Amino acid sequence: MIALEKRPQPSQAWTWATPVLAVLLTMLVGGLMFAALGTPPVEAIRTIFWDPLFNPQFASYSRPQLLVKAGPLILIAIGLSLGFRAGIWNIGAEGQYIMGAVCGAAVGLAFYPAESVLIFPLMVVAGALGGWAWAMIPGLLKVKFGTNEILVSLMLVYVAESVLASVSSGLLKNPDGMGFPGSRNLKQYPSGANPELIAGTGMHWGVVAAFIVVILAYVLLTRHVLGFHIKLSGAAPRAARFAGVNPARMILFCLGTAGALAGMAGLFEVSGPAGQITIDFNSGYGFTAIIVAFLGRLHPVGILLAGLLMALTYIGGELAQLMLGLPGAAIQLFQGMLLFFLLATDVLTNYRVRLSNKAKGTV
Amino acid sequence: MDLTSINPVLLIASLMVSATPILLAAMGEMVVEKSGVLNLGVEGMMITGAITGFAIAVNTGSPALGFIAAAAGAAMLALAFGILTQFLLSNQVATGLGLTLVGLGLSSLIGKPYEGIKSPTLPRLDLGPLSDIPVLGRMLFSHDIMVYFSLALVAAVWAVLKFTRAGLVLRAVGESHDAAHALGYKVVRVRLLAILFGGACAGLGGAYLSLVRVPQWTEGMTAGAGWIALAIVVFASWRAGRVLVGAYLFGGITVLQLNLQAAGAQVPVALLSASPYLITILVLVIISVRGVHGAPASLGRPFHASH
C-alpha cells in the first residue's frame, strides 16, 4: 500500500526538483502526443527545445525572440506571484495587459507627431496606470464588498477585449490607415517606439524592466517587512491579522502591483514587438504567465528561469509549426500539461511517500 | 431603433435555448461545490465537451452520440482534476485554472479540421397538442430534448439533495469532511463522483453550444460561459432552483443584447457585447453586499485522512 505522510515542512530539495521533473514528464507525454499526431516525437522535442537556441540555421532569428517573449511573461508573472503568495487570485492579467497597452498607446498617439524624450516615459506611466486601474476594480470590489476577485478579474478580460476591439476600429484608428482597423504603427514614431536596444539580442525596455522587477521582487520578498507580510498572509491569514497586517491594504497592494506590471508589459509590447493596437493584439501572455508563476515556484529567480523556458516553448512551437507542421494548439496544450504535471508532482514537496504493509491511514 | 422588431415570444423561446448550456454547466458545478470541491475548470471542460460532441456528431451523424461523447470526454478531463486534487492533494484553484488551460489547448487541437463544417443538430421535439397552443406552444413547447433534459436535471438534483440519503451524504462531505470521515463515509470517493458528474454536465453544456445553439465549431467558442456558470452558482447560493433562475436571467440578458444589436440600438456595440460580463460582475457585487450565504463550509479545503 502506498501511503502519504505529511512533511512537517515542505521539502526544500523537492521544491526545486519538481519543476524539472514536471518538464521531463511533459516532454515524455508531449512526445507521445506528438507521435499520436504523426510527428516524430524526438524530432519535435528537439525542434522545440534545442533548435531555437543552437541550430545554426534558425538560432540567429530565434535567440533574440527568447527575450522578446520572456520579457512580458516574467513581468506579468512576478506581479501575479505576489498575489498568489498572499492568497489573492488575480487571473485577469490578460485584461490588465490589454488596458495597459491601450492607455499607453493612447498617450503616445495623442502626442503624435511631436518629438520629445519625455513621451516614452509618459507612455510607460500611462500603461502602468491603465493596468493598475483595471486591477483596482476587482481589488476595490473585494475590499468593499467581499466580491470574489477570481471571477471579477476574469470577467474583466472579456470586457477589456471589447474595449480593445472598439478602440482599434474607433478612437485609436489610424487616420491614414485607409479605413483598415488598427492604430498608427508606433515603430515608425521615434518618440513613442520601444526599439531593440542592442541589435541582435531582442533586448528592449520591457526586458530591462523585467530584469529590474525580478531584482526588486527578490529584495521585497527576502529583505523587506512587506514581503514577509505577503508570505504570512498566504500561509496564515489569522496570524497575519494579529501581526497587524491590514488585509484590505494587502489585497490592494498585490492586485495593484500585478495590474501595473501587466499594464507595463502591454505597453512595452504594443510600442515594441507588436507596434500597433489591433483587434487581436493580445496573445494570451496574461494566462501563460500564470503557468510561469507556478513553474517558477512563485520565486523571482524561479520565475526568471520559468519565463525563459516558456518563451522557448513559444518559439520552438512556432518553429515546429513551420518545420514539422505541428498544429499551433499543440503547444498551448503542451504548456497546460506542464502546469498539470507540476501540480501533480508537487505532492512530493509536501508529503512523504511511504510504502507500508498496513492499509490503515491511507487516502 | 425599432423595438417592435423584437418579438417577445421568440425572445423567451430563444432565451431558453441560450440559457441551457450555462444551466447544465452550473448544475454540475453546484453539485461539485456541494461536495466541498471548487473546480474552476468549468470553461475547459465545457469547451472540451463542445469539440468532442461536435466531432463525434459530425463523424457518426448522430447528435445523440455526440452528447454522450461530450459528457464522457469532459468527465475524463474532470477525472484528471479529481486525481490531482483528491489523491495528489494539489491546490484546487491552481488545478482548476490548469484544467481550463489544458481544455482550451486540447479543444483547439482537436477542432482544427472541424472548422467551418455544419453538424447534424437536434430535432425539435414534437409535443403534439402542447406545441400547438397558440403563444405558449411556440414559447415553451417547441424545443429540443436537451432543453427539457436540463430542466429535469434541475428537478432531479434538487430532489436528490433534499430528500435522499445520497444527497445527505454529499452535503455532509461538503460541510465537514472530517465529521463525514469520522462517520465512515468515503470522502474522496464521494467527491470524485461529484467531480465526474460536474464534468459530464459541463460537457453536455458545451456540446449544446456547438451542436444546437451555434451550431458550428469555432476556437474558444465558449467565450467565458464556464466562468459565468461559476458565477451563477455563487449567485444561486448553492440552491438548484436559484441556479435555474440565474441561468435564465443570464440567458435573457444575452438574447436581449443580441436583439438590441440587431434592432440597431443607439448603444455602442462594444458595450452591448461586454454587457453579459458587466452584468455578471454587477450581480456578483450585489450578492456579496447581501453577504454570501449557503457556501458549503469545506469548500476548497483539501482533505487528507491523516490531518
Image: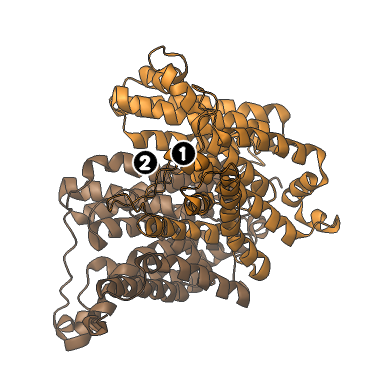
Q: How is the image coloured?
A: by chain
The vertical placement of B239 against A101, above or below, is below
Q: CA distance from mark 2 to mark 1?
A: 9 Å
Q: Secondary structure at mark 2?
A: helix
In-image side of B129 versus B44 (left or right): left
Q: Amino acid at mark 2?
A: Leu
Residue A343 spot, x, y in % from top left: 57, 38
Chain coloured brown: which letter? Answer: B
Chain of the residue under label 2 = B
Chain of the residue under label 1 = A
Q: Amino acid at mark 1?
A: Gly
A291 or A271: nearer the viewer: A271
Residue B212 spot, x, y in % from top left: 23, 61
State yes or no: discs 2 and 1 in contact (Cβ < 8 Å).
yes
The vertical placement of A32 against B174, above or below, is above
In-image side of B195 versus A319 (left or right): right
Q: Quick check: do tags 2 and 1 share a chain?
A: no
Q: Which residue does the image show at 63% across and 61% down from the upper left?
A: A139
Quadrant in which the C terminus of chain A appears: top right
Q: Which residue does the image show at 68% across and 65% down from the upper left?
A: A143
User: Which color is chain A depicted in?
Assistant: orange
Q: Which residue does the image show at 64% across and 36% down from the upper left?
A: A297
The vertical placement of B194 against A340, above or below, is below
In-image side of B138 versus A329 (left or right): left
Quadrant in which the N terminus of chain A appears: top right
Extreme-right residue of the structure: A243
A301 or A20: nearer the viewer: A301
* Residue A316 picture quarter: top left
Pointer 2: what residue? B106
* Residue B64 picture quarter: bottom left
The label on residue A336 is 1
Residue A269 spot, x, y in % from top left: 49, 41
